[in-house]
């Protein structure tokens, strides 16, 4: 089966990118007891309604896979990802979410063996109601301070109105009908993600 990817300009994809709203890292404070760990935001963006040329056409979001490359500020031993549909007018069905180490910030490729599935209440898929955010389960996935992270998610369809952040400066890739674990779509520009 051949996979066709479509290059989208920055304005078209900027709105979609806030699907991954934040990444958190878990950091130990002094002792290594579980009670001495805390979640710290390491990447985030403000949320806006993506409109006009800042939104992605609904047909480009049917069974689509989005990979966002983000630059983390803090490091930690585990991560969580917050996804947002706060401005959506219908539910957003995320069918898969993965994190990995990107080969570089100039490529959609990921380092072999670094891909990990992220879950929500121990399930791969999550249905985010209109007006809501969802926080993933924590996964043990060490990240260094000032490192990069690839966040790849697959969505079933557009949420009616996109939660986004026009003007973001993070690289993202969008392609239709490609599993999140193997996504390697065409380049474009945009942003969104957080670390804990």
Image (cartoon, rainbow, N blue to C red):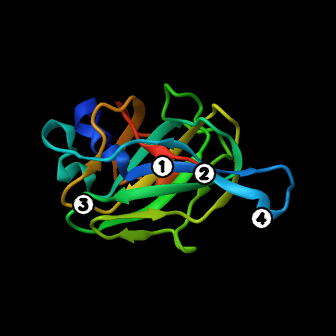
Q: Residue at x 43, y 69 (%)?
A: 126
Query: Around disc 2, counting alpha carbons within 10 Å, would you say few (fewer than 14), some (14 to 19), or many (20 or more)?
Result: many
Label disc, if present, on residue 36 of the rendered structure: none
**Which percent across, then down, holds residue 2?**
36, 46
- Left/right of residue 135 with respect to residue 155 in the rendered view: right
Quadrant of the rendered image containing residue 110: top right
- Who's the residue at 55% across and 66% down the image? 119
| Residue topped by disc 4 | 35
- Looking at the image, do the residues carrying marks 4 and 3 touch, with CB atoms under 8 Å apart? no
Q: Is residue 187 left or right of residue 164?
A: right
Q: Secondary structure at mark 1?
A: strand
Determine the CA span between mark 3 and mark 2.
24 Å
Q: Report if residue 2 is visible in the image.
A: no
Image quadrant of residue 71? top right
Residue 22 numbered mark, or none:
1
Q: Earlier in the sequence, mark 3 or mark 2?
A: 3
Give the labeled residue for mark 3: 88
- Mark 2 lies on residue: 196
Contact check, label 1 and label 2, Cβ < 8 Å: yes
Work out whether mark 4 precedes mark 3 in sequence or the reverse, and give the earlier one.
4
**Percent from the top left, x then y, of residue 30?**
84, 49
């Amino acid at each position: 089966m051949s996979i066709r990817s479509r290059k989208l300009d920055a304005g078209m994809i900027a709105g979609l990118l806030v699907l991954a709203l934040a990444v958190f890292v878990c950091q130990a404070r002094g002792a290594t007891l579980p009670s001495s760990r805390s979640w710290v935001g390491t990447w985030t963006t403000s949320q806006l309604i993506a409109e006009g040329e800042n939104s992605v056409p609904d047909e480009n979001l049917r069974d689509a896979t989005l990979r966002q490359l983000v630059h983390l500020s803090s490091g930690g031993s585990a991560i969580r990802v917050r996804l947002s549909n706060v401005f959506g007018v219908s539910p957003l069905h995320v069918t898969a979410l993965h994190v990995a180490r990107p080969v570089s910030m100039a490529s959609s490729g990921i380092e072999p063996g670094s891909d990990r599935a992220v879950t929500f209440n121990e399930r791969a898929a999550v249905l985010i109601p209109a007006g809501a955010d969802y926080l993933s389960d924590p996964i043990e996935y060490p990240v260094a301070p000032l490192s990069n992270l690839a966040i790849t998610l697959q969505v079933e369809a557009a949420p009616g109105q996109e939660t986004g952040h026009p003007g973001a400066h993070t690289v993202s890739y969008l392609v239709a009908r490609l599993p999140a674990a193997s996504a390697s779509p065409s380049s474009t520009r945009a942003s969104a993600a957080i670390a804990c």
